[in-house]
Every structure is written in C-alpha cells, then in structure tokens.
Amino acid sequence: MLTFFHSPNSRSSAIAALIEEMNIADWVETRIVTIPRQDGSGRRDPSNPHPEGKVPALVHDGHVITERGAIILHLCTLFPDSGLSPAPGTAAWGEFISWMVWYQGVLEPVVIFEGAALDHPWLTSTFRSHKEAVARIRAALDRGPWLMGDTYSAADLLVHAPYAWFKEAAPDDPTIRDWIARCMARPTGRKILDRDAALIAAQAEATA
Ligand SMILES: N[C@@H](CCC(=O)N[C@@H](CS)C(=O)NCC(=O)O)C(=O)O
C-alpha cells in the first residue's frame, strides 16, 4: 500500500503533480497534513510520518520514503510504464537518476545559498555555484527540448520546480525560461495549483 503525505502549496505539490502525470492516483492514497509555514501559520502534524515533520513523505507498506528525488525514483520504478522516466536499469535510467540526485544534492542547495547570499570556499568547492548549475541545465536543453531529450520526464518536473515557485531565482536565459514555461503549462500542474488553492481555502476555513 502506498500513502502520500501532502501539504498544499509546498514542495510536495511536485509529487502531487507527478502522481497526476503518471496517472497512478488509484494506487496512491493521498493524505493532507499541515506543516509550519514561513509566515508563522500552520503547525507540525502528528499524523505525518516524515522524521522532520516535512512534506513530501511516501509510505510504502510501512517504509517511510522522503526527499522528492527518492520518491520520484521509487514511483517510477514501481510504475515503469507510466512514461515519466526511462526504463529502470537502462543507460538512460542512470542519467535520469543523476538528475534526481543532482537536484537534491546540488541544485536546490545552490539556489538557497544564492537566495540567502551565502558564499564560502567550502560551499563553492562542494557545490560549485548556481551559475554553473544553470549551465548544466542549458547544455541539456540545447540537446533538448527536454532535459532527457525528446520526451518530457519527471526530471523536468523536479528540476524546474524551484523556478516555478521562486520566480526571482529563474535564470535570465530565454531557452531556460521557455522550458520553465513549457513545464508550468502542463495541464497537471494547473490542476494541482487549483486543487491546492481549494485545500488552502478549506484549511483556512477550518482554523477560522
Ligand atoms: N529536501 C526535501 C525538502 C522538504 C521540505 O523542506 N519541505 C517543506 C515544504 S516546502 C516542509 O515540509 N517544511 C516544513 C518545515 O520546515 O517544518 C525534499 O526535497 O523533499
């Protein structure tokens, strides 16, 4: 059994969109939880199994899976025919895994460091910079039109996410901006935004 713990308008929205893209909602139960928000609203939800009280979390037969990249890899392995990744075990799958792990280990940290104006030689030697990360995205899109080539995949879904949420972080590069716009224009993304807005309204009403 698969249970997805989601809080609207958060990093878990990417997993909600993935479940729509993969057309696997019948196999994954979604449970809505609250999280502490930067504006002081919300609170940690005792029913959320994530060890740090964050979202997303996916529970598979009692095993807790966290980090979007790991959740995406797990769902794409369980549902290999959903069309959101290369077939597990192939050479292209190895490249797909690289995007997932690079996103978690490099891209999100360098976007945060830049936003927080953090600079230190240890950070640069470990992560390089947002500029270099952007160059990697651009090189893939030059082969494109998607990160993995001809086909939209969960790599696009995850890697474009910070730029969809923090528009000021989006690189001033027409090719990358066009790719972000194409990712955001997918009907599933719109559907999740609308559903999240309804959930936020319902949560606000419940706490009023
Ligand atoms: N590295 C994690 C990040 C998860 C994360 O930071 N989630 C935020 C939602 S935007 C959260 O749950 N924050 C609640 C808190 O800080 O307690 C991932 O990619 O899944």
Image (tube, helix red, strand yellow):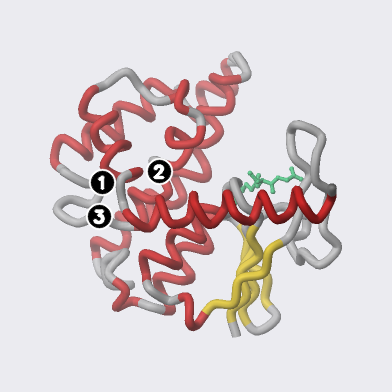
Residue behind mark 2 = 159
Front residue of 183/53: it is 183
Disc 2 and disc 3 in contact, CB within 8 angstroms: no
Q: Position of residue 146 (x, y in %)?
A: 22, 46
Q: Callout 3: helix, strand or loop?
A: loop
Mark pair 2, 1: CA separation: 9 Å
Residue bearing mark 3: 152
Q: Position of residue 207 (x, y in %)?
A: 84, 51
Task: Please state the horizontal and vertical placement of residue 93, each as a whole percent of the image.
Answer: 30, 63
Q: Amino acid at mark 3?
A: Tyr
Q: Tell whether 180 sits left or right of 37.
A: left
Q: Secondary structure at mark 2?
A: helix
Q: Residue at x 77, y 52 (%)?
A: 205
Q: Earlier in the sequence, mark 2 or mark 1?
A: 1
Report the residue at 20% width, 38% height from top: 141
**SS class, disc 1:** loop
Residue for badge 1: 147
Is the distance from the Cβ of mark 1 to the nearest ligand 1 atom less than 8 Å? no
- Which mark's residue is nearer the viewer, 1 or 3? 3
Q: Could you tell me residue 179's position as x and y percent? A: 26, 37
Q: Is residue 69 left or right of residue 117?
A: left
